[in-house]
Amino acid sequence: MPLRPLRRVPLALALLVGGLTAGVRAAATAPAGGGETAHFWYRLAPKDGPHIDTQRGSQAFGLGDGKILFSEDNGRTWPYAADFADTAQVNFSCILQNGNVVFATPHRIYVATHRLRSVRELTVKDRDGRDFRPPPPRNPANAGWYFYSLDGVNTFDVRGREMLIWGNYANVRTEPVSANLYYSFDGGETVKIAYTFGQNPKHQYPGADPSTWLGAADNPVLCRHIHSVSYHPAENAFYACTGDNNRGHGKPECHWLRGTYDARADRWDWRVVVSSESKSRFKSGGINVADGQIYWVADANGEKLPDEKYDRGIFRCAPADLPFPERHVKLYDAPYELAVMTVDGDVLLAPEYGPANPCLAGFLISTDKGRTWGVYDLKEFGDRSGVRVNRRNSEGWFRVDLRAKWLDRAEVLFIKPKPAS
């Protein structure tokens, strides 16, 4: 994809590109075109502005018509822009502590530095330091997703240094790809693979010779895709969970992994903590760590006996107790599977998983660390599923990526919790 010369655009031009008005400016504190529940205020991002793909503090990264944009005032103004032809294909982005933005299309990944003054494509390095280049898609209109993440929190303070880490949610309605965990420990200047799952025979190109299969030939651990990755600072360890189902190849696809990183050697050690069928709470998502406890949501579904109940809910436990369900605390007894959750302070925000839930645009929220819950369906937005929930910005708003039919980019929703009573 060609990159044209980059420049900082004048403020007036940025306002024109973003389509911002004084009314939109006021929406950051008084919801316009939104509403409220007993637990939160909510509003959509302005329709005439850029698609706000991620946020951090007062910064936001936006996608316009052939341009990427950067804001330092929570999207009120967009004074920085660069030409980028494939904005419609961007499906991952993250603002790092140093202000760099790592973003990706289905098969390619980039870093933008110095408020978008420079944009360059990155070549991912594999576990052995070799170039990892996703093979060209056979059908570009249906390219597999090498870099898309369900999580909206992808950066963590690792012993005083920031790490970007995530796994790709893929192999759903697209061409096949390998399932990988990626990381950057140098402010987004390089991206490397932390772990590659094995060669899943159910997620390969039809008729492909096994010698060309996607995935790590030396890894017996198979999955379809990654649901979530998070970091436990007290343990200095990472936790990841995968999906998805029982596919007749004789191996489970639902795993929890624990990984440790040796920064001096730039080496990872990943171990499987537990593997499970898809009907259990160990088919999980939305991993968060708070107060030394691991929090997650259960995405349990798949085959079960007629009189068997799915093992669903929102849970927490100590890390050592993770393999033992009897030691888990169920914070919410969810009737349907969940896939995403972000914990920020005392607030737990979990969008409902639209394809499996009778609600249209559902949200679960707790403002007291899971002791009490509110359940809401924002029907006015239609059939939507929330993913990539960023932590609250400097004005207290979560950013939620609303998806139609689970995968298709739709609107951006902002949610601001009300103070706990």
Image (cartoon, helix red, strand yellow):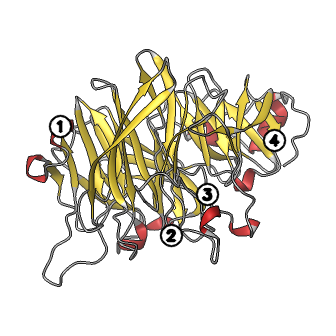
Q: Amino acid at mark 4?
A: Leu
Closer to the camera: disc 3 or disc 2? 2
Q: Earlier in the sequence, mark 2 or mark 4?
A: 4
**Disc 2 from disc 4: Cα separation:** 50 Å
Identify the residue under disc 1: 320
Residue 348 bears which disc, if any?
none
Q: Is residue 165 left or right of residue 360?
A: right
Q: Amino acid at mark 1?
A: Ala
**Disc 2 from disc 1: Cα separation:** 33 Å
- Where residue 191 sits: x, y (%)? 62, 34
**Disc 4 from disc 1: Cα separation:** 54 Å
Q: Earlier in the sequence, mark 2 or mark 1?
A: 2
Q: Is residue 356 left or right of residue 79?
A: left
Q: Is residue 420 left or right of residue 363?
A: left
Residue that sits furthest to the left in the current view: 326
Whether residues under marks 3 and 2 lie with C-beta atoms below 8 angstroms apart, the answer is no
